[in-house]
Image (cartoon, rainbow, N blue to C red):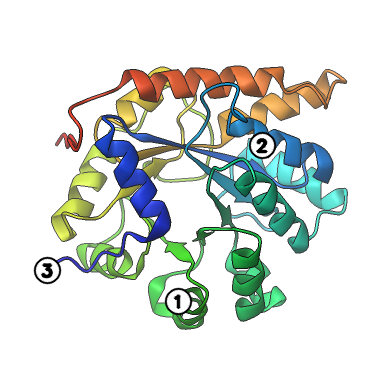
Amino acid sequence: MSSFQPGQTGRLLADVRASGRGALVGFLHVGYPDVPQSLRALRALTGEGDSEGVDLVEVGMPYSDPMMDGVTIQQAGTRALERGVRTRDAFAAVEAVASTGTPAVVMTYWNLIERYGPDRFARDLAAAGGAGAITPDLTPDEAAEWLDVSDAHGLDRIFLVSPSSTDDRLAATVAACRGWVYATSVMGVTGARTSTSSAAPELVRRIRDVDADALVGVGLGVSDGAQAREVTGFADAVIVGSALVKTLLAAEAAGTPDDLSGLRRVVADLADGVRAGTSDPGTRLVRA
């Protein structure tokens, strides 16, 4: 019997897969280049009704010691902190995304939740329309308080696994997740790459050996539509962050931080990629 809990974001991914394609998840920080412009950028990820966009938004909460983040995401996050972004701004960002009809989750290191107060954080996230949270540095065996408050407020909880995760760790993580499982497809920090990880299909296969009903999103490294299409051939969702953040860094470097045209072009390419990767509804390919 499956122990996996699909939750609201998992049901979204399952519905997208049933339509014959994989889902697209996009990440941007709240607070970069500043809070108001970050809200506009986050809404732009969704297409805002004018064009195809992402299916789910990750609202990144900048952190002073982002141990898993690569140079691109660290740079944007550091600038956001220097410019005064606060935890409460993440709730405004979630509300801005939710207003477009696209679900949003936050991605945050546990220390920020702990400092804010886990129950208070879960309450305010749910009140803003948030669907859940990704906690990259929190393991299920240390997450008792988060399990309780996420249950109390109806939030999905997405934990991470990697190619180095043992079979026992995979089983425990999948069982603790609600929504989907975040599979980091390469060892190391985040960052766009010129090719996808060869370890990703094997990691997805191992997750489904643990629980065939588990929904899996693959992240770290995807930079264009062709790569996104490749990943959704074996995973339920592809997660893109650095390639999107780079467009905002480039706009600020050019002296036009309000210009979201580069962001929209990358989102359009990624969306075209996953939509071109259609298959028979319900099919999930797994390559050894």
Quadrant in the rendering for residue 109? bottom right
Q: Label 1: how many residues lie within 10 Å, few (<14), some (14-19) or many (20+)?
A: some
Q: Does 74 sit left or right of 89 as displayed? A: left
Residue 36 image position (x, y, % from top left): 83, 42
Helix, strand or loop at mark 3: loop
* Distance between the alpha carbons at the discs numbered 1 and 2: 28 Å
Foreground mark, 3 or 2, reads 2
The image's mark for residue 168 is none
Give the residue at mark 1: 151
Quadrant in the rendering for residue 185? top left
* Residue plotted at (63% across, 45% down): 97
Disc nearer the start of the sequence (1/2)? 2
Total marks placed: 3
Helix, strand or loop at mark 2: helix
Give the residue at mark 2: 43
- Quadrant the C terminus occupies: top left
Residue 28 image position (x, y, % from top left): 64, 41
* Distance between the alpha carbons at the discs numbered 3 and 2: 39 Å
* Residue plotted at (52% across, 74% down): 153
Q: Check the image and report above or below for 9 versus 112.
A: above
* Residue plotted at (54% across, 35% down): 191
Quadrant in the rendering for residue 233? top left
Q: Check the image and report above or below for 86 versus 270.
A: below
- Amino acid type of the residue tagged 1 in the rendering: Asp
Give the residue at mark 3: 1
